[in-house]
Amino acid sequence: MNPLDNDIKYVSGVGEVRAKLLAKEIGVHTMRDMLYHFPFRYIDRTKIYNIGELNEANTSGGYIQIRGRVTGKNYFGEGRNQRFVIYITDQTGKAELIWFRGIKWIENKFELGREYLIFGRPSFYRSELSLVHPEVEPIEVALSRKESCGMQGIYSTTEKLSAALGTKGMYTIIGKILDNCKGKIVDYMPHYLRERYGLIPLEQALENIHRPQSAMALKQAQYRLKFDELFGIQLNIQSLRAARTTARAGFHFGRVGKFFNDFYNNRLPFPLTGAQKSVIKDIRADTVSGCQMNRLLQGDVGSGKTIVALISMILAVDNGFQACMMAPTEILARQHYATITKMVGDIGLRIAVLTGTTKAKERREILAALAAGEVDILIGTHALIEDRVQFAALGFVVIDEQHRFGVEQRARLWAKNNNPPHILVMTATPIPRTLAMTLYGDLDVSTINELPPGRKPIKTVHYYESARLRLFGFMREQIAQGRQIYIVYPLIKESEKADYANLEQGFEAIVRDFPLPKYRVSACHGKMKPEDKEESMRQFKCGEADILVATSVIEVGVDVPNATVMVIESAERFGLAQLHQLRGRVGRGGNQSYCILMSDEKLSKESRTRLEAMCETTNGFELAELDLKLRGAGDINGTQQSGEIIDLKIANLAEDNQIVQIAQQAAVALLTVDKNLSLPEHQPLQQLKARYSKREEIDFSVIS
């Protein structure tokens, strides 16, 4: 048995109680888990500050180390509110050491007049330095201890774990594991791969990530462990790709028939852009290749993804198959249905729409026609994945705004046929390259990076609350010109926890400022009944309402060419991707459109950066890269909710683009010569692959 697989409770100083706490608080069960709980930053323990030189400006957010002599101690408060204070001084000033817990254990550890070395996070009250729950040891003990390195890791922890172990306790446990396992850690990476990619041995990497002897040693350790993590992910992704492209035949769409020619020659509403033609060419190549297509289509808002999807579905119908398109909301599904039926006109395609609100009689008729092969294209919401929805010959599936669906939901749609259909997943949220390679590396990726001709760039401005009257004046001007306006709020009702503008108050304010019947106002949010929401959207689409007050429920799919102004209240509350999506609801006609970001005067640095970026560029890919840097991979595209993001322990997709590319190339090269990792020198890599196999994506090789 590998020693790293031993229970953490068997490490000296841990035991049953601390082991349960480590498992509950940070998911550490084994010695391996503990070694892979990496420091998130490092501090220099060789530096000792004078108390007098410290202030809020030069210690912000950091840890410090001071040397002081105990001059007194005291207790304040009673019971659970009691705190214990030690007073210390050095030749330059004085400070307080404060404990709120473990007082009985700590109070007898100090002697008046004795000197101690103190380490912790500083805080200041009336310019007086204090440290809460610091690490403390007598100065003679500290000076006699031979430090292995001046750099000490700081580990992410919780309040309960910090009280039980502290930074020093975590560091001590990890040190014991490293010492006990010296010479016993098996490196699963073949020697030739380590040489080829400049990787230090695994045991050396684990030693130097926790107890680095130098900055260079730390850098080498980080590179090795980041590579391992990303390489393990890529082994899984590239195995999926290989299974899809080699193990299963796809439906052959060799015919370009009547429907395609009629639509393309007579019904195409506008000339296709070069980017759209390129994507259609990619899809055509996939569907005649003999392999099942699994393609991600990303394109900025308004770039024309829907017509590409429609042309692809028409190709499926021409070849004797059915197609379907699944959208995340009823608004978007019905929008697609209205757009597509209008575009295809009377060329003979049989199109239906199925949502959760479809009446029982109509639902029965649609399901019967679908099973009999009398429906060519079915458009709908999650209703499409119900068991009673049966296709006669499903050959092509389109998933719009794919990140809004869970993996299991999508899998149920794939399984609507004995052989998996061709799959086109679409997103209007541009995906940063490293994230796409890590999450969707088993998909082929196409990008539409052009807007249809005639579209004018949207002008984006940021207004503070003090410019409210100016905003109202501009809105009146736009309505006077016959235009319509969206106003989006982050909340439906006022929240005690978040002081942001809310829809109910905003609706009342707009009605007061734009008195009926001169201006007509509708509201739309996720808590409304479907029929009420649909009626509000109908009024706005048909021009019966001048202003639509809404939440981000209108983020995708709402297409009103006459709407030229998007006002986003409390814009600092939204992420960049969502702001960009909302902005894309305007600018869909030939008139100049505007996006106005409203915020309070007080903004965090990150919020200000987001709003400035929105004003500076309309390029969704640039914004996606910035969003990744600001928010991290877990929040982009809602991936945390849909279970597709890997829990990266050390790699950073915003910073490690080069390592992602190298790891992908290495995985492709390795699997080309040994697709099952069955050669003796590659078998240990199966452990690495298994560790990162929890990515909940569809394994097309097991769908029957």
Image (spheres, helix red, strand yellow):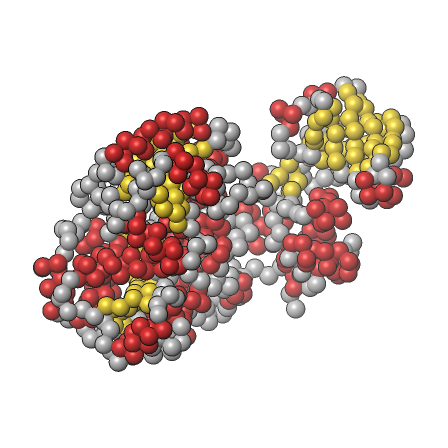
Quarter of the picture holding the C terminus: bottom left
User: Where is residue 430 drawn, in percent x and y?
Assistant: 35, 48
The foreground one among 586 and 43 is 586
Furthest residue in direction bottom, as rendered: 372
Residue 483 quadrant: top left
Q: Is residue 231 above or below residue 607?
A: below
Residue 31 quadrant: bottom right
> What residue is at 63 percent from the left and 25 percent from the top?
58
The foreground one among 350 and 172 is 350
User: Where is residue 61 drawn, in percent x and y?
Assistant: 62, 33
Number of marks in the image? 0
Q: Is residue 578 above or below residue 427?
A: above
> What residue is at 32 percent from the left and 33 percent from the top?
475
User: Where is residue 368 drawn, in percent x and y?
Assistant: 29, 79
The foreground one among 676 and 136 is 136
> What residue is at 39 percent from the left and 44 percent from the top?
549
Quarter of the picture holding the N terminus: bottom right
Q: Is residue 381 above or below residue 171?
A: below
The foreground one among 525 and 609 is 525
- Asked whether residue 249 is in view, the answer is no
In this rendering, would 166 be left or right of 507? right
- Asked whether residue 131 is in view, the answer is yes
In this rendering, would 38 be left or right of 572? right
User: Where is residue 609 drawn, in percent x and y?
Assistant: 44, 33
In this rendering, would 189 be left or right of 520? right
> What residue is at 58 percent from the left and 42 percent from the top?
497
Residue 90 quadrant: top right
